[in-house]
Amino acid sequence: MAITRTVAVAQGKGGVGKTSVTTNVAGLAALAGLRTLVVDCDPQGNVARDLGLEPGTGSPLLSALVSGSPLPITRAVRAGLDVVEGGPEVADLSGLMYARSARGGGNLAQSLHASLAAVADDYDLILIDTPPGEKVLVEAALGVAAAVLIPTRADDASLDGLARVAERFVVARETNPELRLAGVLLFAVGARSRRLESSVRRSIQSIVGNAAPIFEARVRHLESAAVDSRRAGMLAHELEGAAIEDRRARLAALRAGKAPADGLLVRNAEGLASDYEAVTRELLTRLAQIEEEVGAA
Ligand SMILES: Nc1ncnc2c1ncn2[C@@H]1O[C@H](COP(=O)(O)OP(=O)(O)OP(=O)(O)O)[C@@H](O)[C@H]1O
Ligand SMILES: [Mg+2]
């Protein structure tokens, strides 16, 4: 049985926005008052970085899943937002769980399901960030989620990655028939290339099928904000305020005849923050719809 209101963010290709989308949507959902949990199933552990936490080793998550002890939840990293951190040792899960299921024990999806089911009632929304490869980890996330959100860039390599995750989705439904496609989300697209965008939307449709939802909202290309985000451990909507502070500091330095301190690269993160807001709204609407469909079935 899928864990309700749990979304796996997955894509076969690296660098297509899985972690950025996960953390920003989680941050905004929490800001909107939803009790939100992010689970980082990626050995890269980038969720921690995006949220300004010290990168962890992944060892607490590994032990929890292997031994069935409670998930290592870091509470209140923002108001209403909790995190289970990933990290390098999460990569060892594949081998360890393989050995365990060969001995007749449960597989990784079963452990993850048990761990999440134990805390699911505490949350209105659970987002699982997944690595670009690591088949076993991605399968486990798809094995427990109620929905999958697939971010993609517009290039051909990313669309190949989209095809790979679409195949995994089909396989995952054999063990998790309640899994639904939340949608495909265009990531880092040029704000003014509408023609490119509609051509990409057509390509996506041909890969995932006409019935599959492609998000109306998309995340614009804004490299400066992306770099600042990760350096400063701030989400897009948090950068918005920081960029204004930064301008103030620059002007003060100018008045004082001093050189401005090294500040943020981005001058205005407002557009990006409002893109994520639209994505969050669309995802929540879509989840409500999925819940209704699954409930009716
Ligand atoms: N709005 C944006 N515009 C352009 N680049 C961005 C934007 N947001 C994030 N990036 C950059 O895109 C890269 C990939 O982002 P992200 O880490 O979210 O992708 P990912 O799919 O999680 O990657 P991985 O597969 O390695 O886990 C990062 O280098 C990030 O700085
Ligand atoms: Mg990532």
Image (cartoon, rainbow, N blue to C red):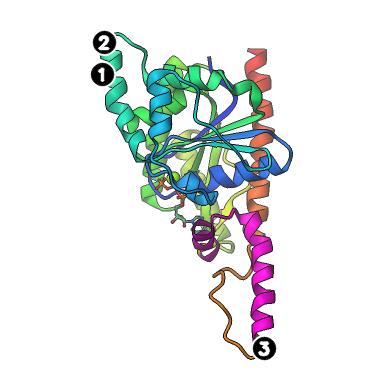
Q: Quadrant of residue 89?
A: top left
Question: Viewed as shown, does residue 52 lie left or right of 238?
Answer: left
User: Which residue in the protein does label 2 denote?
Assistant: 103
Q: In the picture shown, does residue 252 fall above or below 79?
A: below
Q: Nearer the viewer, mark 2 or mark 3?
A: 3
At a point 69% along the width and 69% down the height, the residue shown is: 244
Circles 2 and 3: CB atoms closer than 8 Å: no
How far across and how far down the image is residue 243, in percent? 64, 67
Question: Viewed as shown, does residue 108 lie left or right of 113?
Answer: left
- Ligand 2, by image quadrant, is top left
Q: In the image, which disc is placed on residue 225?
A: none
Question: Viewed as shown, does residue 58 lie left or right of 95?
Answer: right
Callout 1 secondary element:
helix
Q: Quadrant of residue 286?
A: top right
Callout 3 secondary element:
loop
At a point 56% along the width and 20% down the height, the residue shown is: 3
Q: Amino acid at mark 3?
A: Ala
| Mark closer to the chain start, 2 or 3 | 2
The segment highlighted magenta reads 224-253
Q: In the image, which disc is placed on residue 99?
A: 1
Q: In the image, which disc is placed on residue 256?
A: 3
Between the C-alphas of marks 2 and 3, the distance is: 71 Å
How far across and how far down the image is residue 170, in percent? 43, 24
Query: Does the magenta run of residues contain 41?
Result: no
Which quadrant: the C terminus? top right
Q: How many marks?
A: 3
- Answer few, some or many: residues within 10 Å of disc 3's Cα (few below 14, many 20 plus, some between 14 and 19): few
Q: Quadrant of residue 245?
A: bottom right
- Answer few, some or many: residues within 10 Å of disc 2's Cα (few below 14, many 20 plus, some between 14 and 19): few
Q: Amino acid at mark 1?
A: Ala
Given residues 139 and 80, the one toward you in this image is: 80
